[in-house]
Image: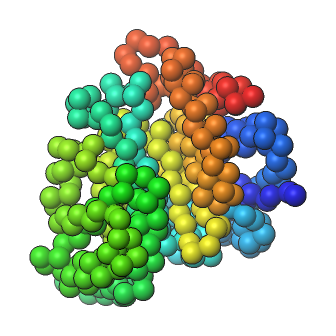
Amino acid sequence: MKTTIAILPGDGIGTEVTREAVKILDAVAQKFGHEFDLPEGLVGGAGLDAENNPFPQSAADICAGSAAVLLGAVGGPKWDDVPTESRPERGLLRLRAALNVFANLRPVAPHPVLTGTSPIRADLLEGVDIMVVRELTGGIYFGKKERTADSATDVCTYTRSEIERVLRIAGKLATGRRGKVTSVDKSNVLETSRLWREVTNELMPVEFPDIEVEHLLVDAAAMHLLSRPADFDVIVTENMFGDILTDEASMLAGSMGMLPSASLNDGTVGLYEPIHGSAPDIAGQDKANPCAAILSAAMLLRHSLNLEEEAKAVEDAVTHALRDGLRTADIAAAGEPAVGTADMGSTIAAALA
Ligand code: NAD
């Protein structure tokens, strides 16, 4: 049976890294005997240019008929002066809303051969394997906003059910990992955080009795992420704290070009994308690291298609290429030769064959 995966390359290096991720999906299909239909849609600036819409109906239709969506990145200076409502990033928000994805998963596991590319001391990175689960649709980013000339208000709201559903995803992930969930909040100051902690303390012992639960205030969590990163397993937190902590955590791995992400809903349809943007400074130069996009495809195989063996094979192929010394410019040490985006992708695809 054919499985349809929507491919939305987007803008800038999004198109380049997605091309390599598609090579990998083709290689997986060939090796494991699957049939993947990979229709492409326009999103972001590409959608604006072609259809005056950052998430055109044509792309929405492709996504609606797909088991999962693989996205590159959106945005770039060309669209900087576009009104807020139709900016490329709006296309991404509308895509997330259309798929109803509420939990953003960002694994951070610095590759042992790349610890030198992180600004964090190599001895602190030993054994680091963190899964950050960020709530994606609630909190201050989506609350009521008010503005006068002299004052501004952003309202932060969370409901019990919004907290419960993201905790369940964190609990399930921890069950298949090292059995620990760190819940991050600011319950000494914020009412939403007090509800967050209350719901965590009610739900976790009942639904996940074997999982160890730790609570950290977000300011302390920011420090502990750098001072004892190996102690974390799954971190679960609300939208804004997650936004900030995941960018901090990405530095443990050295380059944004190595980090994938998955955004999940209650069902199996998910949105998979590298954590980086469209990188206009290197776009069109065959310099982008495609590993984050390729590892996002591995997450897609695991979380939406339930193909664990295939996902692991892709991750092993990336490891194989890195162990063989292949480096794109962002992860090459000073003086070390770098390969281009297409060569990196082809070598990883060949390692899968
Ligand atoms: P960026 O992530 O695009 O780039 C930041 C830096 O990291 C740049 O120096 C870039 O060259 C480098 N980099 C990023 N990905 C890389 C890769 N795969 N390989 C090698 N180097 C890589 O962030 P930015 O420059 O702040 O934003 C550029 C555009 O991307 C903006 O329009 C922004 O709005 C958009 N953006 C989109 C997304 C998304 O689509 N999810 C996320 C972040 C930013």
- Residue shown at the point (82%, 38%) measured from the top left: 30
- Residue shown at the point (37%, 44%) measured from the top left: 129
Q: Position of residue 96 (x, y in %)?
A: 56, 70
- Is the residue 33 above or below the residue 139 in the image? above
Q: Nearer the viewer, residue 109 or 245?
A: 109
Farthest front residue in view: 210
- Is the residue 14 above or below the residue 55 in the image? above
- Residue shown at the point (87%, 58%) measured from the top left: 1
Q: Is residue 280 visible?
A: no
Colouring method of the image = rainbow
Q: Nearer the viewer, residue 39 or 304?
A: 304
- Is the residue 316 above or below the residue 88 in the image? above
Q: Position of residue 317 (x, y in %)?
A: 61, 30
- Residue shown at the point (34%, 74%) measured from the top left: 204
Q: Is residue 189 visible?
A: yes
Farthest right residue in view: 1
Quarter in which the C terminus is drawn: top right
Q: Position of residue 277 (x, y in %)?
A: 49, 50
Q: How many marks?
A: 0
Q: Position of residue 308 (x, y in %)?
A: 63, 49
When asked about the image quadrant of residue 25, the answer is top right
The answer to whether 211 appears left or right of 302 in the picture is: left
